[in-house]
Image (tube, helix red, strand yellow):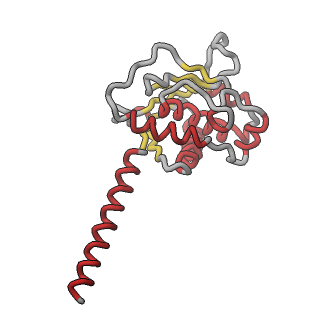
């Protein structure tokens, strides 16, 4: 009887260790490094990064943020905040552009972000712009969804939801993010020749 109990205990411990290891592997696979060049907007960038992390954490994705000078990962997503967007940058309503097939570079027009909403909502809008563009990098496609974070253009209802941190991913986007994270570990991804302009 004692030997049977001992075997059961060992089997239970092995199962627990295996489950923990599986969880660790998933966690590691769903961790993304993002390096940001915030310019003069460091405090705003940090606050927005924190909110963006919360949004991704809800679907089990961890974002590790670094300043560009600290960026050591070759697979990192690189984000620049532009504070002097050229007047002829088209389309005029775009808040960012990215290269989803290349999977690395994002430029956010921070001056346009500040103009789009009242000052109290700038941090939240910037967070959602970061989430939107990082998701393009993870999904590795230039398509958009009919609703939620990955809509091509946000409307007044979406901005209201952002104000209460209620704008979410669709189920199809979550599945695409997970699939993209798996593909992102492959060295055979093609490079993009033209950027995706995000006119939000």
- The answer to whether residue 92 is above or below residue 165 is above
Quadrant of the drawing holding the C terminus: top right
Point out the residue furthest to the top here.
Answer: 88
Q: Is residue 91 left or right of residue 97?
A: right
Tell me where residue 15 appears, x and y as whole percent. Answer: 32, 67
Q: Which residue occupies the foreground of this view, 194 or 48?
A: 194
Residue at x 28%, y 68% (from the top left corner): 14
Q: Residue furthest bottom?
A: 1
Outermost left residue: 3
Residue 106 pos. (x, y %): 51, 26
Question: Residue placed at 71% from the left, 40% from the top?
Answer: 121
With 121 as the anchor, is 191 left or right in this view? left
x and y, in percent, of residue 46 in the image: 55, 42
Q: How many marks?
A: 0
124 lies left or right of 100: right
Q: Residue at x 55, y 37 (%)?
A: 42
Dividing the image into 4 quarters, which one contains the N terminus?
bottom left
In the rendering, at what x and y percent does residue 164 appear?
Answer: 72, 48
56 vs 140, nearest the viewer: 140
């Amino acid at each position: 009887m004692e030997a049977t109990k001992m075997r059961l205990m060992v089997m239970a411990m092995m199962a627990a260790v295996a489950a923990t290891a599986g969880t660790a592997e998933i966690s590691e696979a769903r961790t993304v490094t993002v390096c940001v060049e915030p310019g003069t907007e460091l405090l705003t960038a940090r606050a927005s990064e924190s909110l963006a992390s919360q949004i991704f954490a809800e679907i089990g994705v961890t974002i590790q943020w670094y300043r560009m000078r600290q960026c050591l990962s070759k697979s990192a997503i690189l984000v620049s905040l532009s504070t002097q967007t050229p007047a002829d940058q088209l389309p005029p309503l775009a808040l960012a552009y990215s290269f989803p097939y290349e999977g690395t570079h994002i430029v956010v027009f921070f001056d346009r972000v500040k103009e789009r909403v009242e000052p109290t909502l700038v941090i939240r809008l910037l967070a959602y712009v970061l989430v939107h563009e990082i998701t393009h990098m993870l999904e590795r496609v230039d398509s958009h969804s009919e609703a939620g974070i990955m809509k091509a253009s946000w409307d007044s209802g979406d901005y209201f939801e952002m104000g209460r941190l209620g704008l979410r991913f669709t189920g199809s986007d979550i599945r695409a993010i997970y699939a993209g994270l798996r593909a992102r570990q492959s060295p055979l991804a093609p490079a993009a020749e033209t950027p995706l302009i995000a006119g939000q």
